[in-house]
Image (cartoon, helix red, strand yellow):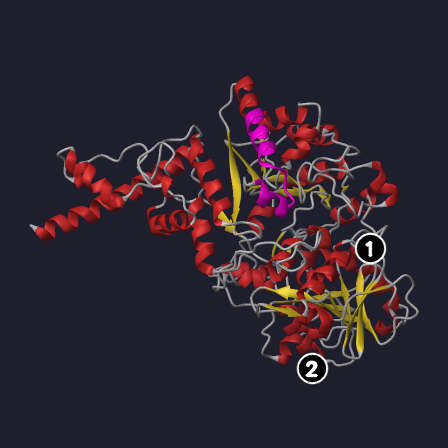
Amino acid sequence: MDFMPVTAEEMRQRGLDGVDFVLVTGDAYVDHISFGAALIGRLLEKRGYSVGVIAQPEWNRLDSFGVFGRPKLAFLVTGGNIDPMVNHYSVAKKRRQKDSYSPGGQIGLRPDRATIVYCNKIKQLYPNVPVITGGIEASLRRLAHYDYISDKLRRSILLESGCDIIVYGMGERQICKIAERLKNGEKITDIRDEPGTVFKTNDITDIKNCIELPSYAVVYKNKALYAESFKLQYENTDWITAVPLAEKYEGIYVVQNVPAKPLSERELDEVYSMKLMNAPHRMYSDKGLGVPAIEEVKFSIASSRGCFGSCNFCALTFHQGRTVTSRSHKSIIEEAVRFTNEPDFKGYIHDVGGPTANFRKAACKKQIESGVCNNKRCLFPAPCKNLDSDHSDYIKLLKSLRELPGIKKVFIRSGIRYDYLLSDKKSDFLEQLTKYHVSGQLKIAPEHVSDDVLRMMGKPGRSVYEDFVAKFANMNNRLGMEQYVVPYLMSSHPGSTLKSAIELAEFLHERKMNPEQVQDFYPTPATVSTCMYYTGIDPETGKEVYVPKNPHEKAMQRALIQYRLPQNYELVKEALTKAGRDDLIGFGAKCLIRPRKAQGRQFARQGEKPWQKKAPESDGLGGKKTQGAGQRGEERGIRDNGFKTKKKTIRNVHKKKH
């Protein structure tokens, strides 16, 4: 067993004078099942094809793409596990300082819009060789899409890259079929009917049941029509109910075939049984470099695919679909046993889950036979009456893993959908989760507490979150444990106003919560929320949506969530004043911050110098201690740092005066 070849010399050592496929990826070559390039390459090898890997080529040099010469069948191109623009730029459009999918975390080893750059270079070098793209970048940009970094509606990546065909979604089924057809002598231009692919054509009259979307020229000028087009796309993401979609450009159509059928349990087991090196290629270790992204996934287990949660800010509906399929217990247990034979395994499985950890099967029997519902969702605005809320299979799987020799702890970190958990009439899973699979803190994602914002997110209402937190606390009390919920929160999502941001701040203040991590809404391609951000329209209802776009307002909304931080004081004060909530500036129990001048006068009235006064328990810088051990430490650190910094500044001023 060895890595796939990365040089011509390694290719020849295998007795090959060329390869069937050259796989070009924007990531470092990590031979692990969670890296899409490695998965596809190894699957093709298992089918009898030869594959050479060009990882992070020097894109300004044509010869970087000619390492293996002309492939016998095709080039396969992916921008990597994360969309390169998201990988490169923060929501503030600032260049990131680290790329976890590159050796040593180095930034700059892949270009912006890597799929486009790579495909154009390959077509320059080998104009007549088929180029097939896949991965998250190509999948989510397969039709006209809003691009946040350039702030414009871009054309299909099929046209911008010059590739011949896009494989969208998870890709295993499609790539194996295309490989077989190319091997049998078919031209890439004749492959027009494979589910889960996108191709270009001059004529759509022979495409059965095809819906023609508004043309790119039209949606580029008319945001309302783009919202309508996006709705049609969103309604055609299920492999059973979808129909082909065609989008017209000047003189050509881009056609999206129906999604590919999800892999069955047996097929998933086959994929995850493949033998890989489970490590970055040796060329990185020879240079003393690791690839950071491997650390979290090396001892994690992917147990399922697909998600019927359908959060508006998530692209999973477009990429994996809403139908959940899972691996067998046998397959998962075998993977866990392999972990125990690894020299660096310490006995801890970091995660057992998928897009949503506690989804292990389709939402209902109807989905399996007739596909997902286009006119309603499984969990929003409330769980569907047909929802099969049963965690028994997942409980059994986790128990089997816990009992394996060499396994100390099995964590669940890929996210629990708490509204689904609550819809299960039994409390077995909550008990098992609390007792065995949490380590002090359970991270869940309510995202917000304003019901108006949550509706725009497609998330359950505030009362559902509060119900879960109460039940989790009660379960901990019953088990004699001390564990706490840590919420992920999002600022500036479409629909979020200063009023709703203040509502969230008041919620946090009331519960003595001090979140360290806050995510500004990031408009990524192919999500309902991104469509709202770009158009100002909810594509599902056609109604207008308020969108916070002004950077200063976004900064205020974010600061309100972390109102305790000293550096956020002026932003919080401005936001409260602007919203007419000066009642939250003062010394009352419900106040978020204190007036600075008044604070100094208070010290003077008490006959103390400001630098002699101890920080009060609720001083607007750190607040009262929380009940959670982890959060208690976080708040204490912020309170101490904030007050000490302020005290030091005052002392320095005092010394200068005297």
Q: Is residue 186 above or below residue 397?
A: below
Q: Residue at x 47, y 55 (%)?
A: 554
* Tag 2 residue: 124
Q: Secondary structure at mark 1?
A: loop
Position of residue 215 in the picture relative to residue 91 (left or right): right
| Of 371 and 7, the residue lying toward us | 371
Position of residue 608 in the picture relative to residue 136 (left or right): left
Residue 466 in the magenta stretch? The answer is: yes
Magenta range is 451-472
Of badges 1 and 2, the one in the foreground is 1
Residue 331 in the magenta stretch? The answer is: no
Labelled disc at residue 260: 1
At label 2, the amino acid type is Gln
Give the image location of residue 351, x and y in percent: 61, 39
At label 1, the amino acid type is Ala
Give the image location of residue 338, x and y in percent: 67, 41
